[in-house]
Amino acid sequence: MTQESLLSDDLLRQLVAVGQVDILVGLPTLNHASTVPDIVRAVHASFSTYFPRQRTLLLNSDGGSDDNTPALVRDCCLDEVGTVTVSHSLRTSHRISTPYHGMPGKANALRRIFAVSDLLSAGVVVVLDPEVVSLTPAWVAALAWPIRDQQCDFVAPVYPRYHAEGLLVTQLLRPLIRAGYGRRVREPLAGEFGCSSKFAAYCVEQPVWDSDLMQNSVDLWLTGTALAGPFRMCQAWLGPRVLATGLHRPGLAEVFKQIVGSAFQTLDTHADYWLPRTGSEDVPLLGTTLGVPEDTPPQDGAPLAKSFSRDVRDLNEVLRAILTPETLAAVAASAENADGPRYPDELWAATVYEFLVAYHHSVMRRDHITQALLPLYLARSGTFLIEHAASVPDAVNEALESLCVQFERSKGGAVERWNQTT
Amino acid sequence: MAQKILEAIEQAGTNFVDSVARFLPRALVTISIVVVGWFIAMMLRWLIRWVLGRLGFNRFCERFDLAAQLKMVGLPSAEALAGVVVFWIVWVGFLLSFVNVLGFTMLQGLVDGFVLFVPRFVVAIAILVAGFVFGNVAWRATLLVAVNARVPSPRVLSGAVRALVLILAAAMALDQIAVARTIVFTAFAIAFGAVMLGLAIAFGVGGGPLARRILDHWFPERDAPDKDEIRHL
């Protein structure tokens, strides 16, 4: 599909009126009326504070909201911000809200945002998550500056987190993506990101937009593409990521299936790039943290790990088709451990890699493979929380680093099995 | 008198020679058909195995647990089994065709019956295989969803789903080949109705709180705060 056919006539007319822009902020939405006004204000505050001399555009790509989200974006009054504006943009800040047709989802929205950025030759593209309520004007600047001043092509976010937060990222995605691609990306699931027009143009040309991969979770594919492609990548500190409450979100089982499926499929897509790589190298981290996370009570891992042994027994037949007999025996032994369930780093790394290889070889329906990993992930997360209940943050960070290193060490065996029956 | 006897013997001999002369070519043709049929059946068996092998049929069957189930009941691999089925259908078809050649009109009904039976048999096999595949997928899907949703006794639940699908497929297959159609239909209706009624009564009497929990889980209040304190993302 060409860019012209992706963009409606009405949108094209509006874009012609806007002309070329320097910074484009994309906001994909679907029923986000409760959160978008604050985000629109933050974006415009960012434009006037940090980019007063730049030509800017806020583009809202809406998936068919029935709660008036597009109108709120269009008509949001910037004076309601309640703060004294200390600077004003010297150029007009444009704002467009446009619906897109087809399956509602972030991928379709992003595809149009990228197409618009290509059409308007936007030097910098920043994409924001409409569900984040902790977003400040500085976030936009933090994601845009590395593109404009450091010639980066993709800026991944880094959020300050407590150790019990973001377990799916810290226990699975971060070590897997780091060991796979050989780059130390802290937040592979980039909810917000910045990118260059080169990266946006490259992405929009890829023949993947209508695939299941994109419908599940486009964020990991973007990170994987930035890592595997000819792009300069960096990371930027943002503030704590707080999501709006009260929004209807899918449960953990559905989210896990989508995100882990997307991670496995992205690795499958970029296999030629990552299979021969060993070790890992740093990705530059720019800026300073824009806040600290709110104090959270200690998290109890016991509820997550309590059904470990029962789950392993229940899923034995399914796990037998995915895991090697040695790994399955070790998982069963860990689940039945007399001193309480344990899931050591080495075993967890082997488990994840064997699931990845099973996914690659499609030993069963692929969504069943990712669903079967969820109880093991919960057990691993639970045992990690129990183990580090009394640990200081530095010790937890060391443990997380050690897990990443273990994933790098275990990669060789996975590559062997990957190639064995190809 | 002796002349008449000689003439009768001569006539009988002539008739025998004529019969043999008439029968021998048919017998040779029959033997040829049987031999050629055997070769063709063997070739088709090999061809089917080769084509299915190229298509990765065994891997497909492994994906749906069919391979493991075949192994469990002592049957060969799915490719080999498909080859054997094709071999016997073709081979028996050739064997029965000799009835036509030899002119055994009494056996013609058997041949016609076989010709009508083969397509139904193939469809029945296809129904069984489809039932098996669907049953295993449904079993695994139910098991995974039940485990992840913390539903009690996930193995019992998923096993029941698989059993129901397999019983349904078996009943449909038997109906297709018209084996004891009335008995199969009646037995299936009674058994299925009894199981469903039993489940409904059991669930209604003993599972009220469970039903409430399941419904609460399936249809949560839209604005209810997330009860899971752990933030996974």
Image (cartoon, coloured by chain):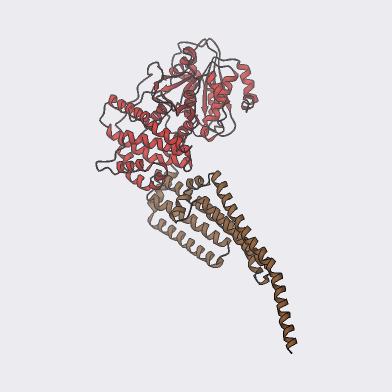
Q: Left of B150 or right of it: where is A62?
A: right
Give the quarter of the image for residue A294: top left
Residue A308 point in image, percent of width and height: 33, 42
Is there any visible trace of residue A240 in the rendered image?
yes
Whether A105 is drawn above or below B130: the answer is above
Residue A99 in the image, given as x and y percentages of width and height: 58, 28
Question: Is A55 situated above or below B87?
Answer: above
**Residue in front for this viewpoint, B120 or A285:** B120
- Between A134 and B231, the residue placed more toward the observer is B231
Q: In x, y percent, where is residue B205?
A: 39, 58
What is the tally of numbered marks visible in this picture?
0
Q: Colour of chain A?
A: red
- Depth check: A122 or A55 in front? A122
Q: Position of residue A31 (x, y in %)?
A: 51, 32
Relative to B119, say whether A50 is above or below: above
Q: Residue furthest bottom?
A: B1
Point 75% across, 86% down: residue? B3
Chain B drawn colour: brown
Identify the residue shown where x is 51% and y is 63%: B189
Split into 4 quadrants, where in the image is the N terminus of chain A? top right
Q: Is residue B116 visible?
A: no
